[in-house]
Image: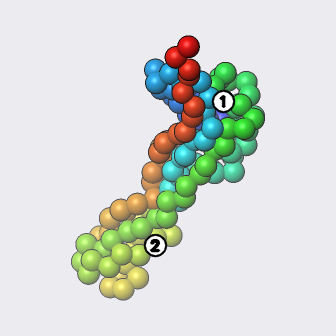
Amino acid sequence: MHEMSLAMDIITAITEDARMRKINYISRIDVIIGDLSNVLADALELAFFYLRTQSSPLINEQTNLNIIREKARSRCNKCMREFTPDYRIAICPSCGAENCDLISGETFRVESYEGCEMDEN
């Protein structure tokens, strides 16, 4: 399950950035997962749930992982119709052309996070 290593990478990256910004607590992490990204949202949530109390002092039981789903979309290069593909290689449902571009759905990234800054005292 590569979602465990992805969750660890997210926690590590957010922790490093938060420390540079003098943030002492992460309350929410927003992650975009595309339908064709080969990342299982449920497995990522489970891995994050397991790792969140063990991997970083800035992340704890109250830290939420907010998963934003990105729908897969393709565009036909012949008739320019946009549609939802079943697979990465899509055939246009309007004209039958095989020359279609995937325009969304492969994304996997941390979009943002929220936290509380450290007191200057």
Q: Quadrant of residue 81?
A: bottom left
> Considering depth in this image, is 16 or 19 the residue closer to the camera?
19
Compared across the picture, whether 30 is left or right of 59 comes to left
> Considering depth in this image, is 38 or 17 the residue closer to the camera?
17
Q: Residue 111 in the image: x percent, y percent?
A: 47, 45
Look at the image and tell me in which quarter the C terminus lies.
top right
SS at badge 1: loop
Whether residue 26 is situated above or below residue 120 in the rendered picture: below
Residue 77 visible within the image: yes
Q: Residue 21 in the image: x percent, y percent?
A: 46, 24
Front: mark 2 or 1: 1
Look at the image and tell me in which quarter the N terminus lies.
top right
Residue 111 image label = none
Q: Amino acid at mark 2?
A: Thr
- The residue drawn where x is 63% and y is 38% is 27
**Would you say the residues marked 2 and 1 are in contact, meaning their CB atoms lie under 8 Å apart?**
no
Whether residue 64 is situated above or below residue 5 in the rendered picture: below
Q: Quick one: label 2, few (<14), some, or many (20+) residues within 10 Å?
A: some
Mark 2 or mark 1, earlier in chain: 1
Look at mark 1 in the image and give the residue it sits on. 59
